[in-house]
Image: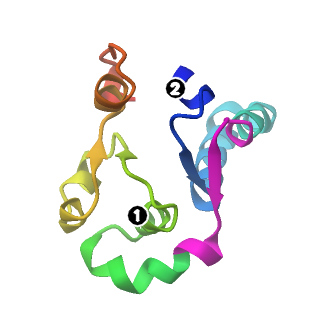
Amino acid sequence: MQEIKKGKLKVVLSDYLIDEVLSWFKIHKGKDFASLVRLYMMSIPSSEMVNDFEWSVFIDDWKYFVADIDDLPHICSYFAGEAEYFVTANRRLTEMKIKEHVKFMSAKEFINDVCGIDGIDTVKGI
């Protein structure tokens, strides 16, 4: 987080990602907690929001590289936001044809390799 605060890294978020995260938190933790998560996500320094009208233009280019249609907006947001890394714990996504065009990293790899901080192993890489 220090690297982000220093402005050395830009975090690319999408409206689709935020909706997906908030839906999970509403179901599992309640709407009040989901509201706090939304506030946190929207306040991440050096972040850029990619909206559906930005990422949707990439769908036709990348739909044949992604087997799970629910992952396609995330991939399209990566390209729309001109991201350098795609941090995910979704192993299935990282094994699809899109892996030839996207630089996937686990959270630990990102923290170790990009931020230069010793990452830790966590449950399911989250």
Q: Which mark is residue 44?
A: none
Q: Quadrant of residue 112?
A: top left
- Identified by mark 2, the residue type is Glu
* On screen, residue 80 above or below 116: below
Residue 54 placement (x, y as % from top left) = 59, 74
Residue found 28% across the figure and 58% down from its top: 102
Q: Quadrant of residue 47?
A: top right
Residue found 73% across the figure and 37% down from its top: 34
| Tag 2 residue | 3
* On screen, residue 63 above or below 101: below
Residue found 32% across the figure and 46% down from its top: 90
Q: CA distance from mark 1 to mark 2?
A: 24 Å
* On screen, residue 72 above or below 47: below
Whether 44 is among the magenta residues is yes
Which stretch did the figure color magenta? 41-55
Residue 117 placement (x, y as % from top left) = 37, 16
Residue 123 as seen in the image, left or right of residue 100: right
Q: Considering the numbered disc 2 on the image, is that residue within a helix, a strand or a loop?
A: helix
The N terminus sits in image quarter: top right
- Circles 1 and 2 in contact, beta carbons < 8 Å: no
